[in-house]
Image (cartoon, grey):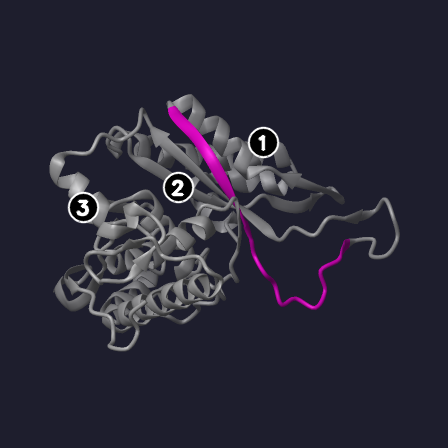
Amino acid sequence: MWDDLFKQWDVKVKRLLLENKASEAFERMHLQLDAVWKESFRVLKEGGILVINIGDATRSFKQEFQLFSNHSRILQSCHKLGFNCLPDILWRKQTNSPTKFMGSGMFPVGAYVTYEHEYILIFRKGSKRIFSKAELELRRESAFFWEERNKWFSDIWEIKGEKQIVKGVGTTTRNRTAAFPLEFAYRLVNMLSIKGDIVLDPFVGTGTTSLAAVLTARNSIGFDIDSGILEIGKLRIENSIKISSEILGRRWREHADFIARRIREGKNAVHINENYNIGVVTAQERTLKWESVHSVDRKNHLSYTVNHVPFEPKKGKNC
């Protein structure tokens, strides 16, 4: 799906693909991405985190089927730039496709493994982040529940992928985008930043990362070469009040159910969250505090100011 974009950026890519020079085309495509990783390194603060979602590619050249390992090429590039590589995550994308077979079907040797996963590569610029006194307070408020921590920091995620058809939306000429689910971005923003941080997405597309930032009381900056596709992102930001209510309501209910199960099993919630008077497993969860989206004000065509208020659980849902 990205061939046309890379051809626009580098005319040599088009020629190499026509000549079936697969390895050379692969390298020239990644030279374009290298520039993005280099600029990301420049703008990140010391201790800042870079996250790259990438899938390896499979295709045939000269009737020879092969894998092109995008993730390993990016690992090499970011290492050379000076990033520290952190443990990654495998995103296993559930598919509804009735046919998953690649190659020779039921016959051995010519059959290929079905590829249903992508990589979430995580890098840090320099040493661990040092928090100011004010940031330490925001970090404590940005805590997540113990059971969420166990789920989110697993090295394998099974989240259903998003449909990628956007033809006819705004002025975009794309038929597909590399959109990932909101749950995907929402987890990562919660895991790797604190309230008030700036989340930058150089491939903002339909605005999933920006929406996740809004929902978690972070600031957001996004770039995309296709201005038309940004119309989708604008609509999502403008609908963030409803989305915020739904997500925080779901998280609250899931935590209430979790604590109720622990109590039935004879496992008490040892600590109490000081903001909501609810049971939690660890002392670090006592300062957890959520923010709901209260209002969204458009400043100009592609800029918004979002106001938040403290989350208030519905009565009858205390743990």
**Residue 148, picture quadrant:** bottom left
Residue 197, can we see it? no
The Cα atoms of the two marked residues, 1 and 3, are separated by 47 Å
Asked if residue 300 lies in the magenta stretch, the reply is no
- Residue type marked 3: Leu
Left or right of 174, for residue 98: right
User: What crowding class fits label 1: few (fewer than 14 Cα within 10 Å), some (14-19), or many (20 or more)?
Assistant: few
The answer to which of 280 and 175 lies nearer the viewer is 280
- Residue type marked 1: Glu
**Residue 215, picture quadrant:** bottom left
Q: Which mark is residue 24?
A: 1
Q: Is residue 29 above or below residue 268?
A: above
Image spot of residue 172 (x, y percent): 37, 63
* SS type, badge 1: helix
x 74%, y 42%: residue: 62
Q: Is residue 147 above or below residue 85?
A: below
* Front: mark 1 or 3: 3
Image spot of residue 53 (x, y percent): 46, 46
Left or right of 110, for residue 266: left
The answer to which of 275 and 148 lies nearer the viewer is 275
Q: Earlier in the sequence, mark 2 or mark 3?
A: 2
Q: Earlier in the sequence, mark 1 or mark 2?
A: 1
Kindly indicate whether the residue at mark 3 contacts the one at mark 1 (C-beta within 8 angstroms): no
Residue at the far bottom: name it: 316
- The residue that disc 3 covers is 138
Left or right of 144, for residue 214: left
x 25%, y 51%: residue: 286
- The residue that disc 2 covers is 51
The Cα atoms of the two marked residues, 2 and 3, are separated by 22 Å
